[in-house]
Image: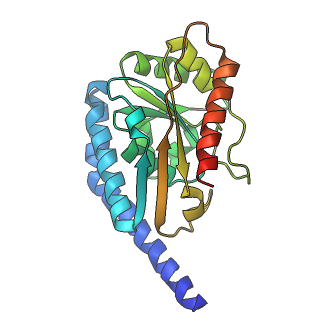
Amino acid sequence: MHWIKTVFLKLYMVWVLLVFTLFMLIILPVMVLPGFFGQKYGHITYFGLWLWSWIFSLLTFIRYEITGLENVSKKTSYIYTSNHTSFLDLPGLRIAIPTQFRPLAKKELLKIPVFGLIVRVACVVVDRSSTESRKQSIKTLTRRIRSGISLLIFPEGTQNRTDQKLQPFYDGAFRMAKETLTPIMPVVVVNAGNLMPPSSVRLKPGKIKVIFGKPIEVYENSDVAELKQTTYNTMLRLLEKES
């Protein structure tokens, strides 16, 4: 029976790759072209990303269960802080977050064929090896927030490859929140790393949960370290509830 399972998973991986590539190419003009005409057309790009994510989920039998959405106001801009254990986090977050947002993405993603084009248009890209790039990214993110667009930041900085539920957080998201007085929306993705481990092309069908916590308000006298710890504790509790 083991060989049957192995053959099934290999065929499944081929199917997922086909779905990923084919529908990304089909929807690519919707996702990329509006970006060349300015940020005011960003909602079209994000509709394209939602459509691709929904089709990917449907045809690969990877279901996203969303809870806590009542904590999210469509009239409010947030800094969404999420854990990150797998590529499969990204379609789930796009399906779950109800308004337009901009993720912070590392420069290396631009090198991925086709997907790199989407990253260039839909994300704020940062070169972590460049201090100037990081400063410019902060300026861009600040402009997006003040124009009413939410941000998505992975405060761990990279995919979690440890056996811990969360890695230590960096300060960036919380300094941004204080500087712009933007509420923080903690969100966790559960089981994505089990279906597709970090840095792996092995994957299997299943259910992934996307869970929103309650927003964390930010004030002028808020302390960055305290905001970081509060967010960390909130996300850890959400993850532990699912253990």
| Residue 21 visible in the snapshot | no
* Residue closest to the eye, 81 or 221: 221
Quadrant where the image shows the C terminus: bottom right
Residue at the extreme top of the image, as rendered? 220
Quadrant where the image shows the N terminus: bottom right
Total label count? 0
| Residue 123 visible in the snapshot | yes
Horizontal relation, residue 55 to residue 127: left or right:
left
Which image quadrant is residue 131 in?
Answer: top right
Residue 5, image x, y percentages: 54, 84
Reply above or below: 22 against 138: below
Reply above or below: 10 against 36: below
Question: Residue at 34% across / 33% down in the picture?
Answer: 99
Horizontal relation, residue 53 to residue 126: left or right:
left
Question: Residue at 50% across / 50% down in the picture?
Answer: 89
* Residue closest to the eye, 110 or 8: 8
Question: Residue at 39% across / 67% down in the picture?
Answer: 60
Residue at the extreme front of the image, as rendered? 241
* Residue closest to the eye, 11 or 218: 218
* Residue closest to the eye, 159 or 40: 159
Residue 216, image x, y percentages: 53, 24
Question: Residue at 65% across / 41% down in the picture?
Answer: 236
